[in-house]
Amino acid sequence: MATCSRRLGSGAAANDRPIPNRLRKQPRPAEISFQRNFAAGRRHRIVVLRTPPRHWQRLVWAVRDVGGAWEHSEGTREGEKVGPCSYAVDDQMAGELAAATSSSGQEYRTSEERRSVNRTVEMMVAAAITVVMGVGNRVLYKLALVPLKHYPFFLAQLATFGYVIVYFSILYARYHAGIVTDEMLSMPKVPFLAVGLLEALAAATGMAAGAILSGASIPILSQTFLVWQILLSVIFLGRRYKVNQLLGCFLVAVGVIITVASGSSAGHSLKEAGIFWSLLMITSFLFQAADTILKEVIFLDAARQLKKGSSVDIFVVNSFGSAFQALFIFILLPFLSKLWGIPFAQLPTYLRDGAACFLNMGTLSNGCDGAPLLPLLFVIVNMGFNISLLHLLKISSAVVSSLASTLTVPISVYLFTLPLPYLGVASTLPTGFLAGAIILVMGLLVYAWSPSMASTSSTSPANI
């Protein structure tokens, strides 16, 4: 069917049929709104011409696909058919209409492209910040353990319980600034309870398996974290991944394994440790993956439920999740302290001595050089890493945040080969570091690559 676009004009023009007096008395229309794509087989398309606001009159034509003709819903005898383009025969104004619709279509496409570019740039910047913070988190954790080498369990509990105070202080400030609303705070707390439970279980199982497994074998098993995230997102989020995305994730995992484990006795260590402890570590990463998927579900549900289409603030999720995690960690303290070789009856003394070393005060401060600066730097950077990781999860997905976190592993391995303070002799690069790093970067590029496909139909308003 031929497409017709004409605009009603008030000037004299050669018309095929007389225009009703009522139409002649109206001034030139000021606004036109219409549907697009008058393709064959689509019936009852509407064209609306609206006069200036002071008249508040509207003329409606129902355009029907009836043998190539249009029917007029007002001012035309019932059953009368007219030929195409027989209305409003001001040729000059038809050209103006074509130019206006073309301009609006271009603006629509430009606006959509600008929003898409902005989202991509925001995600890339957030991913870069997450990688930087993640690398700093790994390096500073090892530096913080130099003065607290006898008190790693104290450092872990300091982070767990200290973050609750810090996160709720930030939440309080954001609430009074109007960023966090009462509606956000009134969200159901059961999902946050589940987040805290999953994080506590992940910590408990990870500590138990980590006490038996060697350091070289843990990065290999940690690649199951990405596999769990993909599976859980397919099951609970209904997400579907393209072949290049799955291939990219696989290459990233392989690259990390080659980068970290090459030249080490990781395979022999896994065999010596036994299948039980390996499965327990894999279960720990399952809990971590479930935690990130649940947080993504919380953000998605909040975007649908909260007013004005806003999503929940990340500090609401962080604060309540950390509070419930601290609660479950406190319940599991007897079990966790035993894993670290600390009898529960001696735990108060251990925590007191750890605090003295952390503050580098008293007679127990011998051998605590670097405290409290290094532990404090680790706590601050670790908090920043958790916040940036959650923000990236909010604006992208759990898998993207996992890829950004995975990228920190080979970068950290390389930094440990540099002469860092307090660490003594620098380590050497694994034999397969370069090959693994190349495979990892290829995996990221393959995951991000999206083939350009020619669009079969345009969605802009200009295509009418």
Image (cartoon, grey):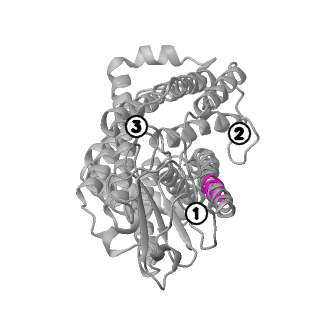
* Depicted 8 relative to depicted 144: above or below: below
Number of residues whose C-alpha sits closer than 10 Å to that of mark 1, classed few (under 14), some (14–19) or many (20 or more): many
Could you tell which of marks 1 and 3 lies nearer the N-terminus? 1
* Residue 376 highlighted magenta (yes or no): no
Alpha-carbon distance for marks 1 and 3? 24 Å
Crowd band around label 2 with a 10 angstrom C-alpha radius: few (<14), some (14–19), many (20+): some
Identify residue for label 1.
7
Res 91 seen here: yes
Q: Residue at x 60, y 61 (%)?
A: 89
Q: Which of pointers 1 and 3 indicates the residue nearer the eye?
A: 1
In the foreground, 180 or 3: 3
Q: Which residues are magenta?
A: 103-111
Mark whose residue sits in front, 2 or 1: 1
Counting from the top left corner in percent of width and height, residue 56 is at 43, 80
Residue 92, image x, y percentages: 69, 62
Toward the right, the furthest residue is 419
SS at badge 3: loop
Q: Residue at x 75, y 39 (%)?
A: 418
Identify the mark nearer the N-term, 2 or 3.
Answer: 3
Question: Disc 2 marks which residue?
Answer: 415
Which label sits on residue 260? none
x%, y% of residue 37?
Answer: 50, 45
| Residue 341 visible, this angle | no
Position of residue 382 measured from the top left corner of the image (x, y, whole percent): 53, 54
Q: Which residue is mark 3?
A: 41
Packing grade of label 3 (10 A; few <14, some 14-19, many >=20) is: few
**Could you tell me which secondary element the residue under label 2 belongs to?**
helix
